[in-house]
Amino acid sequence: MLAIAWHSRTGASEGLARAAAEAARAVAADLPVELVRADRVEPDWLLAASAYLFACPENLATMSGLMKDMFDRCYYPLLGKVEGRPYASIIAAGSDGNGAQAQLDRIVTGWRLRRVADPVIVRLGAQTPEEILAAKILPQSALTLAGELGQKLAAGVAAGIF
């Protein structure tokens, strides 16, 4: 199973996660692809997966709180049980995204996960409080990037490359 754990406040990360899932299903029909919102993720679900895609927004130069909470709840139950499994990530950001990406990478380093694709960071340019809080409309180019990442991850898992 390809586990896609996501959190979104304004729809951007959710839209990117859904685009990745749709493309993953299209390229590897026999591979189960499951999307679960971060606050509903349980350690057993992550343990059952053969690969991971984490999608979240950057808030105040870090992962969103619910995504961090998911890692907090699941970290120790998975420690020593998921080494070497492949992962990829998508960050939705206003202008940077690197803080959230670095935090995510530090956490999964403890699990000894293996990054199999460059991070996808979608910078939406939201800078004012109104823009930051507004529901996001994703450009097709961002959805395409997310879809390509989903395809790559699913194809690699299905073919036994990852």
Image (tube, rainbow, N blue to C red):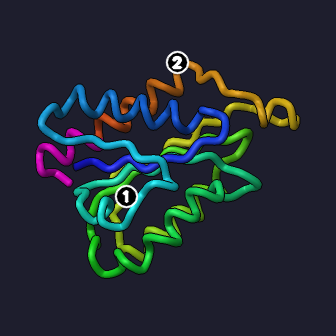
At which x and y percent is residue 24?
A: 28, 34
Residue 119 shows up from this direction? no
Q: Please state if 113 lies on the left or on the right of 142 as rendered.
A: left
Q: Is residue 111 magenta?
A: no
Amino acid beneath label 1: Arg
- On screen, 116 above or below 104? above
Residue 144 shows up from this direction? yes
Q: Secondary structure at mark 1?
A: strand
Single out the residue that lies furthest toward the front: 40
- The label number, if any, that marks residue 115 in the structure image: 1
- The label number, if any, that marks residue 140 in the structure image: 2
- The label number, if any, that marks residue 64 in the structure image: none
At a point 27% along the width and 76% down the height, the residue shown is 81
Q: Which is nearer the eye, 58 or 117?
A: 58
Instruction: Find residue 19 and report its image quarter.
Output: top left
Label pair 1/2, CB-CB below 8 angstroms: no
At a point 60% along the width and 32% down the height, the residue shown is 11
At which x and y percent is residue 98?
A: 64, 53
Q: Residues within 10 Å of mark 1 (few under 14, many from 20)?
A: some
At which x and y percent is residue 15?
A: 51, 30
Q: Secondary structure at mark 2?
A: helix
Q: Which residues are magenta?
A: 153-162
- On screen, 88 above or below 108? above
Q: Please state if 4 lies on the left or on the right of 103 as rendered.
A: left
**Which dot, 1 or 2, sits closer to the camera?**
2
Amino acid beneath label 2: Gln
